[in-house]
Amino acid sequence: MSFSGALGLSGQHFLFIFFYPKYFLQMAGAIIEKMSTKKLVLFVFFILLFQIFSILVGALISPSPTTAISYLATKCINFHRTRAWLMPWGSNRCQQVHSFDDPLAKTLDANDIVFAVHVPLPNTEMSPWFQYMLAVLQFDIAFKMINQIEDDVVITIDARLAYRDDMTSEWTTKFHSVEQRPLRCTFAVSKCFFQTYENEGRFYHCDPIPFMELGSVAHKYFLMNLRLPVNDTMNVGIGEIKDIHVVGIHQNGGFTKVWISMKTVFSPWISVATVWYWYRIRLLARPPVLLEKVIFALGLSMAFLDMPVEWLSMGFEWTWMLLFEDAQQCALYSVLFCFWIIFCGEHLMDQRQRNLLSAYWWQVGLVVFGSSVLLIFDLSERGVRLSNPFYSVWASESRRISVCLYFFSLCRMVHCVFRTISGKLQQLPTMPETRRLRYKGIIFRFKFLMLATLTCAALTIIFFILNQVSEGHWHWGDYTLQVHSAFLTGIYGMWNLYVFTIIFLYAPSHKHNRKKLGDTQHTDMTDKPESQETQLTCGEQGPTEVYRITGKVAEE
């Protein structure tokens, strides 16, 4: 049997397809329409299988994303107030006071005390697999009638950071800065009743203070020396500090290996799929429509996020890695949010200016403006931290409100799309049974894809809002399910699988309908006028039948 015979085509049709591939692809439609139901179900099954696998990788294989270790700062005495590095333990440990209630401490000035913290704990070391390191301060402040915490007080911290890569070498100074942080503390009882001598010695409840962020962990050991300088105007009204706890937070090395491995797998997959998609779009006789361009941009942004540059950071001290990751995520968020708006808008029957980006100027403009503001804010903060890891600025809750409003707007657009499709369904009973069943199947597939889009959007919004919530784990028999890790790997896998699904299903199909090709050629030769059924689907060129029947021309 010949190749053309295996495809079910006559010699004339086969030569037509061979010499005019662009015309053939233009008529073929998208894969979501041409793929058989059996193959489509199998495709969805494998996508769900990969999604479940992504979740299980985080739940069963990966450890928790981060580890938090609390260090009690050692109170070292620095009589001469030199800039020498003071170690909290070891053979060269500093002279210490265990409590400020000791007789020795009562003879000291507040400027003679240096709080020393060694990271990590004894007999352990840091690793580049930790990716980053955060430090949060927690103050233990006792109530004193003569030394109370004032309202809106600011604490000044003279902070220094040093590093070394073995236990015998000298410490190398890395950063030094004098920073100010707001000190927010409350008491267990009402302010009207706690100001009594009976409450002296009881501790305030103080909010944790973000203190430091390192974008790279390229050294094995770190040493922090902190001073609270006191004069007539500095560190006045901060209460009686008893201890300082430094909570060090870093990414787990095991989670880093899992995360980079997933990016290494997804990166070539999405990149090849994006190039393949655009290649097939370029074969079309017509120019790409707006929806196809946005799908291509979505593939590029996903490929940009999947770049596993973390492998290179293992051998270099790239402190800008957190800044680069922010730019990757911002690019994906922006394109993804714009794609959902355009994807829904292009299928609305009442769209007056279709296939024009200017028709979505205010929706896309808001997304681009909001993303740009957040990116500039984040990059400016992280940019300063490249030279000063102790730098910190205010944080805003407005981004959470914005993404929630966006999701509600997207739900409204999806509802309008479904209403438009339902209106078109009323025209199906006038069609022949074969054509009616075909359009019902196409519309059902489109609705299913829209619901999948809405689900992906909802989970993305949840991930955006809850990205910094505390992690947790569940115990199930002999296994420990890492909920936070499963959520992170599951969302990351969902993004890649969703983008791949859109790229694959909206790519021009290679399938060819023999009858449709013969009818088209016959129509071209005889200039036979189109029937009402044909006009329903050919009102406007586009990637799918649903796209065409919901267009402005079809409405008219």
Image: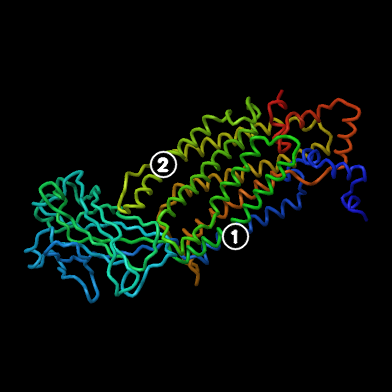
Residue 96 visible somewhere in the drawing: yes
| Residue bearing mark 2 | 376
* Left or right of 25 on screen, residue 394: left
Quarter of the figure with the C terminus: top right
Check the image and tell me how it is coloured: rainbow
Residue at the (78%, 40%) spot, across then down: 22
Label 2's element? helix
Work out whether residue 100 or residue 15 is closer to the camera in this orientation and state it.
Answer: 15
Marking on residue 265 = 1
Residue 437 visible somewhere in the drawing: no
* Left or right of 97 on screen, residue 321: right
Q: Amino acid at mark 2?
A: Ile
Sooner in the amino-acid sequence: mark 2 or mark 1: 1
Disc 2/disc 1 C-alpha distance (Å): 31 Å
Q: Are marks 2 and 1 in contact (CB under 8 Å)?
A: no
Query: Does residue 347 sit above or below 96 in this rendering?
Result: above
